[in-house]
Amino acid sequence: LDMSEEMADRYLNEGFSGGEKKRNEIMQMMMIRPEFAILDEIDSGLDIDALKVVSHGVNQMRGDNFGSLIITHYQRLLNYIVPDYVHVMMDGQLVKTGGPDLAIRLEKEGYAKLRDELGLDIKLVDENA
């Protein structure tokens, strides 16, 4: 995970950058080896190099004895961790399921178009407002 040995001498999560914290979390997951993990926005705050390292760690875990639910708002993570399934939630409801192509389509077209296609009366929040 591209972690220096001096990181082992630091207190847990003290003085770590965002990328170092994420790598540390993935390292802990790799050591514990859970059967299932929920990875909520593991791409948040990562530069492209850290994203690649974290994605590599998650991909190393993939297999018959490990599954994960990866929550993200952006396609860029899915360029490195290709999902088996993509589920779209709006207003707390699962509204669509598909393959990796669904995430690519959402990146190009946005959520509003999907909402309109599905005839959903869900107001999307404008994060820039």
Image: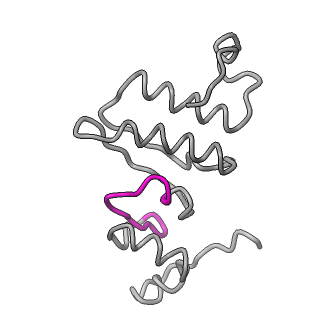
Q: Residue furthest top?
A: 9
Residue 34 in percent (x, y) is at 34, 29
Q: Residue at x 57, y 79 (%)?
A: 123
Residue 37: which quarter of the image? top left
Please tell me whether residue 87 belongs to the stretch shown in magenta: yes
Going by the image, does 124 lie left or right of 120? Answer: right
Q: Is residue 110 above or below residue 127?
A: below
Q: Residue at x 27, y 40 (%)?
A: 63
Q: Is residue 1 above or below residue 103?
A: above
Residue 93: which quarter of the image? bottom left
Magenta range is: 78-92
Residue 87 in percent (x, y) is at 38, 64
Report the quarter where the C terminus lies.
Answer: bottom right
Report the quarter where the N terminus lies.
Answer: top right
Please tell me whether residue 115 belongs to the stretch shown in magenta: no
Viewer-nearest residue: 27 or 92: 27
Name the colouring of the figure.
one colour
Most frequent secondary structure within the magenta stretch: loop
Q: Is residue 100 above or below residue 38?
A: below
Q: Is residue 25 above or below residue 39?
A: above
Residue 41 in percent (x, y) is at 56, 49
Residue 77 in percent (x, y) is at 53, 56
Q: Residue furthest left?
A: 64
Tag count: 0
Residue 9: which quarter of the image? top right
Viewer-nearest residue: 91 or 106: 106
